[in-house]
Amino acid sequence: MKVIDLTHTISENMPVYPGTEGPKLQVANTYEKDGFKETLLTMFSHTGTHMDAPSHLFEQRTTLDSFSVEQFLGKGLVIDCSDLQEGERITMRYIEHVKEKADQAQFILFYTGWDNRWGTSSYFGEYPYITQEVVKYLIDSKKKGVGLDVIGIDPISDENLMIHRKLLAEHDIVIIENLTCLGEVGNELFTFCALPIKYANSDGAPIRAIAILED
């Protein structure tokens, strides 16, 4: 068995969505003074590698803490879209190439290679994003979740978040953003685990995402 960490480390100088305050990691207790170390974490719920709940945009929709824990575990498939250039779209062509495996997967994760730009200003640029046809496929095939290695599932210019809205308005699917290392997973089905911090009425939460590959 091989386990691959798909999660960016939370730090004070990490990239955050434009307009969002970065996290603060304040040492609250020290070895010298208190005999132990404890850190006060202050951050927004959509910091780093994180998961969006339907309640992120819709008041009466499902929160992360109200999902069964099974929602966050299942068969994953990474689809390689790393040939795309800035601003190009992830179309159904990429899914059609691996349709049999995509139909079996519960989580579709799109590998664009954009995580190589993590920590640079270009990370907030015109990253690849999925089309409405891909959104329809995800809904019709009843996926548990969709993930990408970019900062948002909508293009950075779309302040209305139309892809978010289409996915989350009526369907219990989660959106995972800011994944990393998807290029190490390969193109076979694997066990995907993405566990969000469990807090009350959660609209989103940082996750620890991993891929478990069988020998």
Image: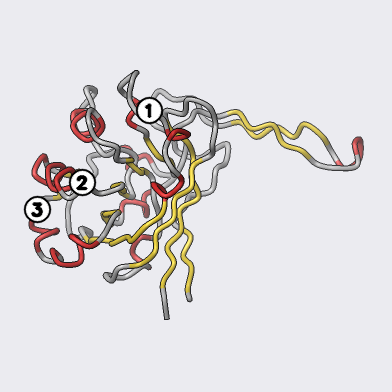
Label 1 and label 3: CA atoms lie apart by 29 Å
Find residue 52 and name its label.
none
Measuring 54% from the left and 31% from the top, which residue is drawn there?
Answer: 199
Label 2 and label 3: CA atoms lie apart by 13 Å
Residue 88 visible somewhere in the drawing:
no
How crowded is the residue under tag 3: few (<14 C-alpha within 10 Å), some, or many (20+)?
some
Q: Which residue is label 1 attached to?
A: 18
For marks 1 and 3, the one nearer the N-term is 1
Residue 133 visible somewhere in the drawing:
yes
For marks 2 and 3, the one nearer the N-term is 3
Residue 186 vertical placement versus 206 (above, below): below
Measuring 41% from the left and 71% from the top, which residue is drawn there?
Answer: 213
Q: Which residue is label 3 attached to?
A: 92
Q: Are marks 2 and 1 in contact (CB under 8 Å)?
A: no
The image quarter containing residue 204 is top left
Identify residue type, mark 2: Pro
Residue 107 at x, y percent in the picture: 30, 54
Which of 193 and 93 lies nearest the eye of the viewer? 193
Left or right of residue 118, residue 77 in this image: left
Find residue 128 and name its label.
2
Q: Residue furthest top?
A: 59
Which of 70 and 119 lies nearest the eye of the viewer? 70
How crowded is the residue under tag 2: few (<14 C-alpha within 10 Å), some, or many (20+)?
many
Identify residue type, mark 1: Pro
Q: Quadrant of the C terminus?
A: bottom left
